[in-house]
Amino acid sequence: MAIDLVGYELKARQSVQAFWGNREAARIKQIESGRQDQGERASVTAGKNMDGFLALILDVIRANGPEKAEIYQQRAALTLPGFFRPTKLWDLLVIYKGELIAAVELKSQVGPSFGNNFNNRTEEAIGTAHDFWTAYREGAFGQQPRPFAGWLMLVEESPKSLSPVRDKSPHFPIFEEFKGASYLQRYDLLCQKLIQEQLYSCASVISSPKSAVETGEYHDHSSMTSLKTFISSFAGHIAATAARFE
């Protein structure tokens, strides 16, 4: 059976428009209430910026997955046991007949502090994956096939995210691919390495300028980390689960 990508291109553009629109609406609401947060925080406290992408992923599940799959997206039902910590909160969980089918993280970064945020996101992504797969190995989810672990990131396109970055490593040289790489290139490299090291079933980074609130414009940065690769990989896993239980 062919997998259904649910017309993801249009829905992705709509998700990008919603991302920027929700951020601006949150900022205006903060200003009008007289309680504006500092800097970019005024645009993120509403916590709904990636909901369009969440809806896209839900469409993929419904189009390809078992009819009665349990889909969890409310905070109270999104924790999984960890190995190095008691629990980890995800953005989306899919469970079917007692098996964990998928766990997905949705992240975003808007300037200006790309350096600190990139390092924090990198450490978080690696730590989450290592904890998740160690817990899986130790039977935290029972005896079952490997679930899908997904990581999807949207980064603002701006001069700061697109410009080459210099690094200092006085004792040993950094890997060649990082030399002069912009933060967007570094996110792409991060996602490639997360996949190559099998830390995530699929990891994707897309970028978009703030002006995309009007157009939904977004860009991929490599075939391995493209949104189409993420959606295809996820849809294939969901479809394979449905076939396994037929």
Image (tube, rainbow, N blue to C red):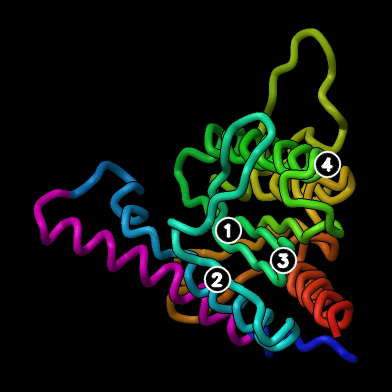
Nearest the viewer among 227 and 177 is 227
Question: Disc 3 vs disc 4: which is toward the camera?
Answer: 4
Q: Is residue 228 left or right of residue 166?
A: right
> Dot 3, how many residues are within 10 Å of its Cα: few (below 14), some (14-19), or many (20+)?
some
Q: Which of the image's four quarters has the C terminus?
A: bottom right
Stretch in magenta: 10-35
Instruction: Report, in whole angstroms, how far the alpha carbon at label 3 lies from the one at label 4.
Output: 33 Å
The residue carrying mark 1 is 106
Q: Give the residue drawn at x 37%, y 72%.
A: 21
Question: Disc 4 vs disc 1: which is toward the camera?
Answer: 4
Describe the element under mark 1 as helix, strand or loop: strand
- Mark 3–mark 1 CB contact (< 8 Å): no
Residue 124 within the segment the image draws in magenta: no
The residue carrying mark 4 is 137
> Dot 2, how many residues are within 10 Å of its Cα: few (below 14), some (14-19), or many (20+)?
some
Q: Is residue 186 above or below residue 229?
A: above
